[in-house]
Image (tube, rainbow, N blue to C red):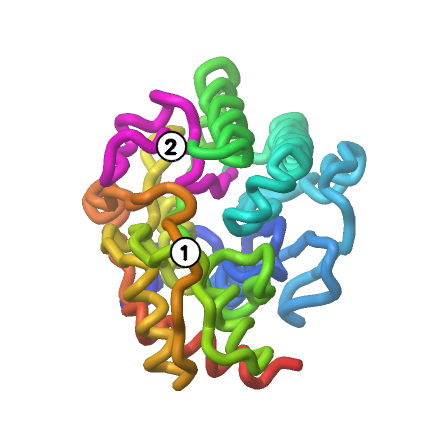
Amino acid sequence: MPVDAAALKPFEGRTVLVTGGTGMIGRQLVDILCEAGAKVTTVSLDPQGDPRALHIRGDLTDAVFCQMVTKDQEYIFHLAGLKGGAASMGQKGLDLALGMMLMDYNVLEASRLNGVPHLLYTSSIGAYASSKFPLKESEAWTGWPMDIPGQAKRMAEMVISTYVRQCGLLGYGAVRLAACYGPGDRFEVEGSMVIPALLAWVKGGGSPIVVKGDGSQVRDFIYSRDAAEGIVLAMVKQPDALPINIGTGERWTIRSVAQVITDVTGMPHGFSGPAAGYPVRVLDVGLAKKLLGFEARTSLEEGIRKTWEWLKTRP
């Protein structure tokens, strides 16, 4: 079920900043917060998103700009980041990591300097090491992250942990998201993550869909609206700076995902070769269920169908 009114009450009439508020998860989060009566400001390089929110277009790698937009905010959801599929991670991993670290540090430090009392950072499953699955929060900072952007996420988490210990910023925390998909994603055959990339293939009229690898890789996918609801609950209920996993905990092979996309779109699919990327990336979501009362409510088929119906209406 959706986030209940009691959980949203703290945002009523409060100033809330959402970085990346025009993105895939951001637009869902902004909708929830506006419905809750919050005074929402969004920041991104995109044009205006939700008309109910004040939108500021700007670059978060600019420290002065970050100090300006975080001033007088009571809650900050830091969603802005750089995203890409396995190919992008391999070819542009350094660019992604440096850009993310600069944005993250600027937003976090500006929030500290401006005395923002509540901040939630969205990290990712890539911040974990890849040795044990499903991944538990107790192993949050053990082992080397899965990729270079994951290392950038890990560093931001550690900055938050330091703020909590040394500065007493007890309202600062983080969530680690499973692979998210949904309306407003980046739909490109090359460079996007698997679900938007395959849907982009169908949108482009190519037949059949060609899935990179043999489809044996196992992933945890979460629909964007579900992710946004988990993020809201984490801001309200998270007990400390330890990152909390937000996902479904379900194990989906890429082969089964491709079949769902074929079922939804009617486009047949095939595979291009040996497996690529990490064989398994699945989160343990027990803590989110226990501490936040969160459980994803959108099935993969329903989420892909909603995403495809949205994409079909877009040029």
- Relative placement, left or right, of 182 versus 14 is left
Q: Which residue is at 66% across, 71% downward?
A: 51
Amino acid type shown at disc 1:
Gly
Amino acid type shown at disc 2:
Tyr
- Relative placement, left or right, of 67 versus 244 is right
Give the quarter of the figure containing the N terminus. Answer: bottom left
Q: List the residue tagged with mark 2.
A: 128
- Relative placement, left or right, of 266 versus 28 is left
Q: Which residues are magenta?
A: 119-145
Nearest to N terminus: mark 1 or mark 2: 2
Question: Callout 1: few (<14), some (14-19), or many (20+) C-alpha neighbours within 10 Å?
Answer: few
Q: Which residue is at 44% across, 16% downward?
A: 165
**Secondary structure under badge 1?**
loop
Q: Which mark is residue 273?
A: 1
Residue in the foreground of this view, choosing between 314 and 238: 314
Residue 24, magenta (yes or no)? no
